Image (tube, rainbow, N blue to C red):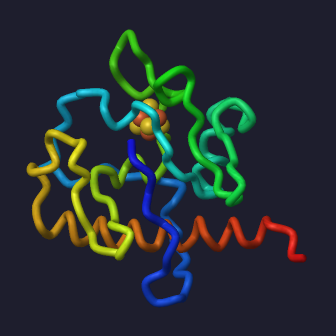
Amino acid sequence: MPPLNSRWSVLGVVIPFPSFNKPRCLGDSMRCSHCEKCCEDTQMELCKADIKRLERRGYERGDFLSSGTDGIPRLRNVGAYCYFYDHDRKRCKEYASRPLGCVIYPVNLTPEGHVVIDSLCPEGDTLTRDEIESEGRRLRRLLDTINMEARESTPSG
Ligand code: SF4
């Protein structure tokens, strides 16, 4: 899964996003063919609510996340796939509690901030234009929150 292009902010303001604890699925039009591509080599960024939700499921954060020099927590890969990927079932082990970025995927942002469907996803064309636009707005809010949380947890120098 490619990185969320999160290193910018649309309006320069952080908008609280109260529904982080209850990920919902993309619209009814989205089909998933379980091609596995989006869980391979994941670089999915996590907000604090994602981390807490997965901890409540019994996981240790040290097992499922990695933090780079930018201070952004991301899902950890085991071998070539996400820590939560179940190879036998070809499914996410924590689908109902998966990170919000995974819920929003395949909607992504270009480095210029344009909402796009990730070209890796073979079912991306099953999303409606309304769904793409509304998930793009949701993704911007999520990325603003992740950036804000990273700034807050970075010691100021
Ligand atoms: S959390 Fe689940 S949906 Fe997200 S990348 Fe990992 S296995 Fe895939």
Q: Residue lying furthest right in this view?
A: 157
Left or right: where does residue 120 sit relative to residue 64?
left
The quarter of the picture where the C terminus appears is bottom right
Image location (x, y in percent) of residue 146: 59, 65
Q: Is residue 95 visible?
A: no
When asked about the image quadrant of residue 117, the answer is bottom left
When asked about the image quadrant of residue 86, the answer is top left
Quadrant observed for ligand 1 in the rendered image: top left
**Residue visible at 33% across and 51% down?**
105
Image location (x, y in percent) of residue 151: 72, 72
Classify 118 as above or below 153. Answer: above
**Residue visible at 65% across and 39% down?**
65
Classify 18 as above or below 46. Answer: below
Residue 111 or 59: which is nearer the viewer?
A: 111
**Residue visible at 24% across and 28% down?**
34
Q: Is residue 105 visible?
A: yes
Image location (x, y in percent) of residue 103: 37, 49
The quarter of the picture where the N terminus appears is top left
**Residue visible at 43% across and 63% down?**
5
Left or right: where does residue 115 sit relative to residue 74?
left
